[in-house]
Amino acid sequence: MPASKSAAAPHIDPSLTAYIADFVVATRASSIPADVAHLGKRSVLDGLGLALAGSASETGHITRRYLNALDIANEKGSTVIGSTLRLPARFAAFANGISIHADDYDDTQLAVAKDRVYGLLTHPTAPALAAVLAVAERDQRSGRDLMTAYQVAVEVECKIAEAISPRHYQEGFHSTATCGTIGAAAGTANLLGLDRETTRRALSLGASQAAGLRENFGTMTKPFHAGRAAESGVVAAEMTALGFSASPIGLEADRGFFRAAGGGYSPEMISGKLGQPWTFAFPGVSIKPHPSGSLTHPGMSVMAELIRRHDLRPERVKRVAVGTNHNMPNALIHHRPKNELQAKFSMEFCMAILLLERKAGLEQFTDAVVNRPDVQALLQRVHFGVHPEAEAAGFDKMTTIIEIELDDGKVLKGSADFGKGSPANPMSDKELFHKFRECAAWGGLGRDAAQRIIDLVWKIDDLANATELTRLLSVKSST
C-alpha cells in the first residue's frame, strides 16, 4: 500500500505544519513501498561509507578534537563513525553529519519544477541519517524503526526544499542546512514516537535553528552545515518531548520559516504530496560517482565518455568550453582552486583531472593533486560559463554542453542533462558496493568489516537492534 494513506491527516486543520506532523506521526514501515525501501537502503549504505571516508578528512579530525575537548565522551553514548569515540546522541549526529558531507560525495535531491534548481535542493541523507542513527543506537531501536524514521526525515526534508521559493537558495541559503534541520527533526520525532502536537512544535523548533550560507561552499563550513542540521533536529525533537514550547505553525506562518527564509513557498509542492509519491520514487535521488558538487557530474560524464571514445590526451587539448544554465556557475564558484575543498566546486578542475588521470575519486581530490603544476596549467585551458541552450532547458535539469578544441583544429562536442548516478543513469548495486568499499578503506575499515556492513544494510529490516550495525562502524583513529 503506498504511503499516501499514512499521510492523510485524521484531523481537519488547514495548517501545513499540522499536515506534516500527521505524516510524521502516522508513517509506519508498512507505509513504505518496496521500491522506495530499497532505494533508501542504497542511500543509507552510501551514507555510512561516506561517514567512514569523511572521518579521515581534516574536517573530521578537527571535529573530533573539538568534541574530545568538551569532555562529554560516554561509553554508553552513540558511535562517532570512523573512530572509537562515543558521545551523547546530539553530538554523535553532529560529527557523523559532518563526515557524511565532508567530501561532498553524498546523495542529492532532484527537482520537479523548472524554476527549482536540480541538484541544489538538498543533500538528503547527511542530516537525516546522522540524526536518526544516533538516536536509534542510543535507544536500541530496531533496524526497521531506524529505516522508517530515515525515510520520514528524507521525505520531509526534500518536499520542504522543493516547496520553498527558489529565492531561498539563489540568494545564499544552503538547503541541506536549512531544510535538513527540519527533516532531521521530523525523523527523530517519528523515532521517539512523539504525538501530533509535540511533533508540530518539534518542526517549529527545528525551523528556528535552520541556517547555513552558500558563501561557505569550498570550505569546511559546508559539511558543518549538515552536521549542525542533524544535531539541531535531534535537539528539536528531544526538547519538545520534554514539554518545550514552540509555535504550532512555524513553517507556514507570516513570520515563519517559508516566508522568512524564502519569501514564500508553493503550497501545491508539499500539501498532500508527502509520500504521494515518495521522493525516492519520483523524481528520485542521485548517488554520486565523484566526490564533487553534483552540478559537475553531467559534464564529468560527458568528458569521461569523450576521453574514452577518442582516446583523448591532455597534450592534444587546446581549449575546453563548458556551458550550463546560470545557476550552475553560481554554485561552482572556484575557477582556479588551490585546495581540495575548492576543487569540489570547480568545473575547471573536474574537467582537467579527468583529462589528466581519467578518473576522479577521493585520491584525486587532495591538496597535493590540486596544486600539481600540470593540473594548474591545464586549468587555464578550461573555460566555464552560461550557454543559451542550457539556460533554455530549465533549472530542473543540469544541462551541460562541452566543446573540446584539439591541436589540429578538430572540435569534439557532447552534452548531458543528467550525470552518472542519477535515476536517468543510476549506479548499479555492484557499482554502489564498489564505492562503499573504497570509502570504507579510505576511512580505515577492513574489507571483512565492510562486507559485513553491506550484508547488514541489505537486511536491515531484520535487525533487532541498530547496535548490530553501529558497532561495525568504529575505527581506531588518531583523534
Image: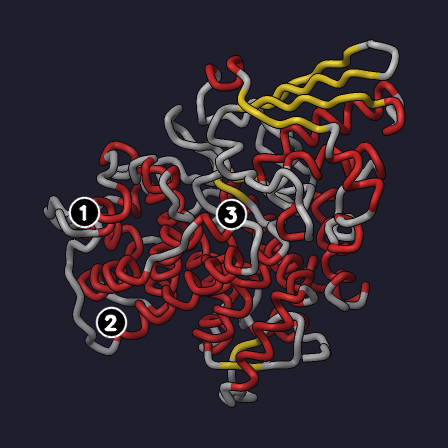
Would you say the residues marked 2 and 3 are in contact, meaning their CB atoms lie under 8 Å apart?
no
**Quarter of the image holding residue 233?**
bottom left
Residue 76 seen in this snapshot: no
Give the residue number, with chain letter if any, for mark 1. 252
Determine whether the residue tagged by mark 1 lies in a helix, strand or loop: loop
Front residue of this view, candidates 199 and 38: 199
> Residue 277 at x, y = what percent?
39, 35
Disc 1 crowd, CA 10 A, few/some/many (<14, 14-19, 20+): some
Give the residue number, with chain letter if any, for mark 3. 37
Front residue of this view, candidates 310 and 27: 310
Residue 248 seen in this snapshot: yes
Does 403 sit above or below residue 89?
Answer: above
Which sits earlier in the primary sequence, circle 1 or circle 2? 2
Which sits earlier in the primary sequence, circle 2 or circle 3? 3
Q: Is residue 229 left or right of residue 196?
A: right
Q: CA distance from mark 2 to mark 3?
A: 29 Å
Q: Type of residue at label 3? A: Ala
> Residue 212 at x, y = what percent?
40, 55
Q: CA distance from mark 3 to mark 1?
A: 30 Å
Q: Type of residue at label 1? A: Glu
> Residue 71 at x, y = what percent?
51, 90
Q: Check residue 240 in the rendering and tell me which mark sits there, or answer none.
A: 2
